[in-house]
Image (cartoon, helix red, strand yellow):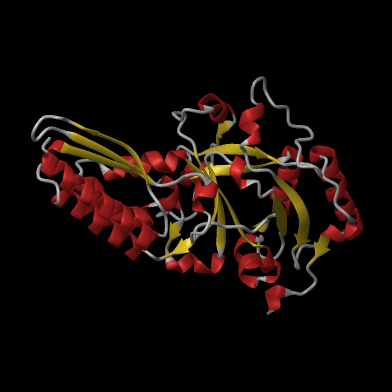
Amino acid sequence: MTDEIMKKINEAEMAFYLEVKNKLDIDINPGSSQSSTEPNGRSNFKFKIPDQMEELNGTKYYCSETKLLHFTSLEALLSIINDSSIRMYNLWNSSDEKEYSHAAEIFDRIYEIIGQNGETRIKLAKSHSFISSFTSSENYLSSYHWENYGNHYKGVAIEFEINPDYKAWYRFILSKTIYDKRNDFDALFKAWHNFQTQIATPNNCTYDIEMNWLLSLYKNQIYSSEQERRLYLFSDRSHANYPSHFAKYTYSALKTESSTLDIKYFKLPLCNDVWEYEQFKIGEKEDKFWDAIPKIRISKIYIGPDLQTDNWEQLKYLIRTSIKEKSGRRLNPEDIIRVKLSLSLV
């Protein structure tokens, strides 16, 4: 490959980096490049958007909130307590049928011009992208959340506390969801297209870009009231570190309403008062793996305004003692809060 062609490739590559930085508010890693020394020879480029939490510090994706809410039913809360863990489901489990493809539509165009099947890539990414959904801890009085996610005011809102030791996290990201900003991806497409047109022999070049987590953070504007925060994991069993460990703690989830989908979940154990796993047994040679996993524990529980029980004090006692027994987390009586405002009438 001649010096002139390499110069054009390098200039177009740098322009692409800058466009991603300016439009998407993130740096991309060059990943790997391999060029033939022959004139008009083949060149291979692999771009990689950061997938480590700390690399996103200072961008619009970085979420530093340490207390988040998860609205659910009382039955689901008891299941979480009994299992002393939360489940991070892959995107086949999403209630939004167009989950992931909302932002990925723009990438169909990219995959088309680089000769890859966009639908296949998206299906693979949905299988290996795992999330848990939360919202701001300030939304414990939100009628929208109680109605849509708190079992129609008869459920609970669990406040989780997250240990912000983000530098230790491996393959996990905590981010706010971005609603209907696909013009960000339009800019990326234009930069990507320009990258190719600047190269004298585009047919002899291959390109790839890894950005699974970024696509999972973009949703349709109709969901903006969720104010969703997502804990995200990408696990495809092919990473250099811990592939067998991720696989060991990933389970199939057969659901009757979606029995044809390949729904799986990663089990994230809950911590006790000192950020340790009380009952969870770490396997042999897994210490470093679990040191790189987000630490999460229950800090408060809000009981829905329309949830009925014969004995409130007994229910609160049952919840507190079960949490202590299963995860070693000690909650005070005032940490179990009954939302008295009848939000369903507002």
Residue 201 point in image, percent of width and height: 10, 42
Residue 138 point in image, percent of width and height: 68, 68
Q: Is residue 124 left or right of residue 345?
A: left
In-front residue for pair 35/343: 35
Which quadrant would the N terminus be assigned to in this image? top left
Residue 91 point in image, percent of width and height: 47, 46
Is any part of residue 105 visible from this angle?
Answer: no
Q: Is residue 221 left or right of residue 338?
A: left
The residue positioned 49% from the left and 59% from the top of the image is: 59
Residue 229 point in image, percent of width and height: 57, 58
The residue positioned 56% from the left and 32% from the top of the image is: 250
Q: Is residue 39 above or below residue 26?
A: above
The residue positioned 32% from the left and 57% from the top of the image is: 18
Q: Is residue 56 above or below residue 145?
A: above
Q: Is residue 285 above or below residue 24?
A: above
Q: Is residue 244 left or right of residue 105?
A: right
Is any part of residue 38 visible from this angle?
Answer: yes
Specify the farthest residue to the front: 3
